[in-house]
């Protein structure tokens, strides 16, 4: 059986469908809401799980015979700067609880996403290499940087098959991201599809790496189903499809809504974005498990715009 933590977030809500389609067993989806709306499916079971609770994590993995874990529960960059202590506890204590329980209960495979937030301000901005010495300066980055080291540690010490992708900003229209720094991109496309004005909290020239959700999900499953020996990197693989600034995105969406306008009003998230690279080197993912995103920026924006427009009808 599969366990997903943080399953109600932007990634979890979409991953459930991809796993249902590719996997025959039961999926235990967990999060910290008491009674969320989860669609009916005999192979999906929802349970409350706060990953900071070591005993609860161990119990669910043992009692539900879990053999694969997708550990998505995490506090993202913007929320992490508002409440660094919470980010530390969820992202690090929570992750160690999951890793320990996986070793004790003989879990076969674990996925723990990482992020471009693991880079710090000293990084080479274009095509940032997978191995780097640029220490992150946000609490989110610090916890994820440490998580990458913990993943590698549990693999080396306990032979636990932990795998990871460094997600860039993920673009999607199903569940809105609300806690990160790259979220403006989703919001801008949504506003363009449903109105004529958007107020952007990043400066117009702030370039960041991005990826469309279907490509992120396919990459995740492709890496997770690759043979053990092809996964040479146990910290985390870089993945991204394209890189753009808010201004470049604005120009792309204006092709679909010529009346659309953006007002730039940077807030505290600008400081976070300034520490991240513009683009990251993905050649290891290509070489080791054939990473191949299909959507370019134009196709992504067209698909999201259409779906956001339908949502407003
Ligand atoms: C954030 N979307 O903005 C996340 C991410 C690319 C960074 O991990 O916090």
Image (spheres, helix red, strand yellow):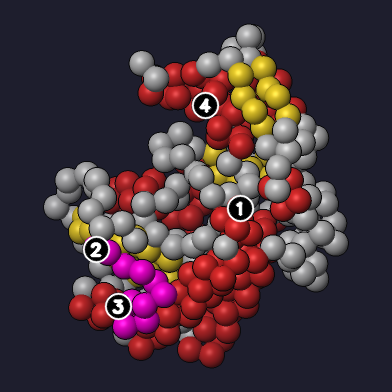
User: Alpha-carbon neighbours of circle 3 within 10 Å: few (<14), some, or many (≥20)?
Assistant: some
Pointer 1 with pointer 4, Cβ within 8 A: no
- Residue at mark 4: 190
Q: Position of residue 29 (x, y in %)?
A: 29, 59
Question: What label sits on residue 298 in the rendered view?
Answer: none
Ligand 1 is within 8 Å of the C-beta of the residue at disc 3: no
Find numbered disc 1 in the image and state the secondary structure of the residue it sits on: helix
Spatial CA span between label 3 and label 2: 11 Å
- Residue at mark 1: 78
Disc with the residue nearer the chain's start (3 vs 1): 3
Disc with the residue nearer the chain's start (3 vs 4): 3
Q: How many callouts does the rendering have?
A: 4
Spatial CA span between label 4 and label 2: 31 Å
Residue beneath the point at 17% across and 46% down: 40
> Mark 3 or mark 1, which is nearer to you?
1
Disc with the residue nearer the chain's start (2 vs 1): 2
Q: Is residue 102 visible?
A: no
Spatial CA span between label 2 and label 1: 27 Å
Ligand 1 is within 8 Å of the C-beta of the residue at disc 1: yes
- Residue at mark 2: 47
> Mark 2 or mark 1, which is nearer to you?
1
Q: Position of residue 129 (x, y in %)?
A: 77, 60
Q: Is residue 183 visible?
A: yes
* 151 over 275 or under it: above or below: below
Q: Which residues are magenta?
A: 47-58
Residue beneath the point at 56% across and 26% down: 189
Residue beneath the point at 44% across and 19% down: 309
- Residue at mark 3: 56
């Amino acid at each position: 059986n599969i366990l997903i933590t943080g399953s109600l977030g932007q990634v979890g809500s979409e991953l459930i469908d991809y796993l249902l389609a590719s996997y025959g067993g039961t999926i235990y989806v967990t999060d910290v809401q008491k009674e969320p709306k989860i669609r009916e499916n005999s192979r999906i079971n929802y349970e409350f799980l706060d990953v900071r609770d070591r005993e609860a994590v161990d119990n669910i993995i043992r009692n539900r015979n879990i053999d694969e874990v997708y550990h998505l529960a995490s506090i993202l960059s913007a929320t992490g700067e508002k409440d660094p202590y919470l980010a530390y506890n969820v992202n690090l204590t929570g992750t160690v609880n999951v890793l320990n329980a996986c070793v004790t209960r003989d879990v076969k495979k674990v996925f723990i996403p990482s992020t471009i937030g693991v880079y710090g301000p000293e990084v080479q901005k274009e095509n940032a290499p997978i191995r780097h010495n640029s220490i992150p300066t946000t609490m989110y980055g610090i916890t994820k940087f440490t998580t990458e080291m913990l993943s590698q540690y549990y693999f080396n010490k306990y032979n636990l098959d932990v795998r990871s992708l460094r997600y860039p900003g993920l673009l999607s229209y199903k569940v809105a991201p609300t806690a990160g720094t790259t979220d403006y991109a989703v919001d801008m496309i949504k506003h363009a599809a449903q109105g004529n004005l958007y107020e952007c909290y990043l400066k117009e020239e702030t370039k960041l790496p991005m990826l469309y959700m279907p490509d992120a999900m396919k990459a995740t499953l492709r890496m997770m189903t690759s043979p053990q020996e092809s996964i040479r990197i146990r910290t985390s693989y870089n993945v991204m499809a394209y890189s753009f600034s808010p201004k470049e995105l604005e120009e792309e969406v204006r092709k679909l809504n010529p009346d659309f306008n953006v007002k730039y009003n940077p807030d505290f998230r600008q400081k976070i974005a300034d520490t991240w690279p513009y683009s990251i080197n993905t050649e290891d993912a290509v070489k080791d498990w054939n990473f191949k995103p299909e959507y370019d920026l134009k196709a992504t924006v067209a698909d999201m715009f259409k779906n956001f427009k339908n949502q407003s009808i």
